[in-house]
Amino acid sequence: MTTPRLVATPDDLAGLVRAWRREPVLAIDTEAASFHRYHNRIYLIQVSTREETAIVDPLGVGSLDEFGRLLADPKVEVVFHDADYDLRLFDHQYGLQVRGLFDTRVAAEFLNEPGLSLAALLQKNFGVTVDKRFQRADWSRRPLSEEMLAYAAADTSHLVALRDRLAERLEAAGRMAWAREEFALLEQVRWSPDEDREPGWLRIKGARALTRRQLAILRELHGWRAALADQLDRAEFRILGNEALLAMAREAPQTPEALEAIKGLGKETAARRGKALLAAVRRGLKLPEKDLPRLERPPRRPREPEYEARLARLKEARGRIAARLDLEPGLVCPNSMLEQVARAEPADLEALAAVPGMRRWQVEAFGPEVVAALRTP
């Protein structure tokens, strides 16, 4: 591999995209800065062919439309390692989608590799030790050092060769079609906001132990922090840690002196942000009782002995199948899928294939055993 080329102008990118269109396979990775920034953005794109590596600077090249059309060309296989987050970022920031995907992590799962990280796979297959010095680097800063660019390039410079080795083993094991089905499903991954998840303030460890009034204060404090993080584009924990938010929610400080005594806050933060923090606490304290947050606990399901027995038989069958295939049970069939199958009670393979989320490879590889487990009293 040659020294990575930094692509930082529109003309440079256009020339490389024309050259990449002639390549049968490209390895791609991205670098974001979520450890430093509030907004999820791509700050580097690493691209490797079999011969060379280039690093695209999205801050300099302008439009990525032509690059996006390259990623969407099914004639060019695009290799990622653990593609899910990269694909979501490409969709979120640029509206780009990938076709012809090959994910080396998925491939390694179907080969039951003991280490699924890229570092573990590169070490095992090529004796390459990944430099971890820049794992939490701020990729949004410019200029980037030569060492940082070399680190970024290492993520893709061996990825095509790794793809070749894993693909050969998948073919030999008769599992390439299994992996291809998962790759095709990954191609459909899109960015989704957190709207369907529980609120961020409720995900803070220890929040569920608070009273309703304390939860109101925590919600106000968390909202203040999120708004400031958005404004400054700075990671939330770099503004104020969860431990300090939780302590303020518990103790409800109402004076600068009480605020300064909060564990994890610090005098500097208390001085700079004290007025806003105390105002957030006051809003939580003044909230009418009827408007206080209420933790909704899902109703307890009544016991369903027949369903539970079916699920137990399915888990036993999965254990046998996993041992036979030499795969992790969760890859063979995750618990959520077993629960759906236990409720649907498919009587044959056609009905099993119709269960939402069921893969073709699962039905073909062990469908009869699943149906038989449901029939067994």
Image (cartoon, grey):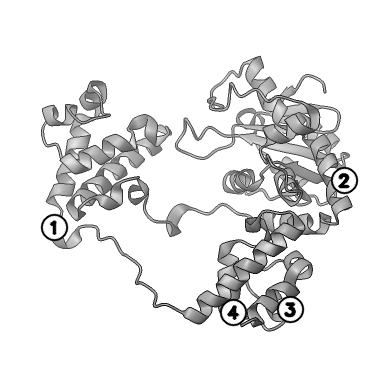
Q: Is mark 4 on a helix, strand or loop?
A: helix
Name the residue at 75% across, 75% down.
368
Identify the residue position indicated by label 3 in the image: 349
Name the N-terminal-most of marks 4 and 3.
4
Q: What residue type is labelled 4?
A: Ala
In the depicted structure, whether residue 158 falls above or below residue 116:
above
- Number of residue marks: 4
Q: Is mark 2 on a helix, strand or loop?
A: helix
Q: Residue at x 30, y 36 (%)?
A: 243
Please name the residue that numbered disc 4 is placed on.
Answer: 344
Front tag of 4 and 1: 4
Image vertical order of residue 305 relative to residue 180, above or below: below
| Left or right of residue 261, residue 235 in this image | right
Q: Which of marks 2 and 3 is nearer the N terminus?
A: 2
Q: Residues within 10 Å of mark 4 (few under 14, many from 20)?
A: some
Q: Which amino acid type is marked by label 1? A: Pro
Q: Which amino acid does label 3 sit on?
A: Leu
Q: How far apart are marks 1 and 3 (CA)?
A: 57 Å
Nearest to N terminus: mark 2 or mark 1: 2
Q: Distance between the residues labelled 4 and 1?
A: 46 Å
| First in residue order: circle 4 vs circle 2 | 2
The answer, for residue 357, to whether it is visible in the render is no
Specify the label residue 323 is tagged with: none
Residue 346 rendering spot, x and y as whole percentages: 65, 81
Q: Are marks 1 and 3 in contact (CB under 8 Å)?
A: no
Q: Is residue 144 left or right of residue 157?
A: left
Label 3: how many Cα within 10 Å (few below 14, some 14–19, many 20+): some
Q: Compute the Cα span from label 2 to label 3.
A: 30 Å
Residue under pointer 1: 288
* Marks 1 and 3, the one that precedes in the sequence: 1
Residue linked to disc 2: 168
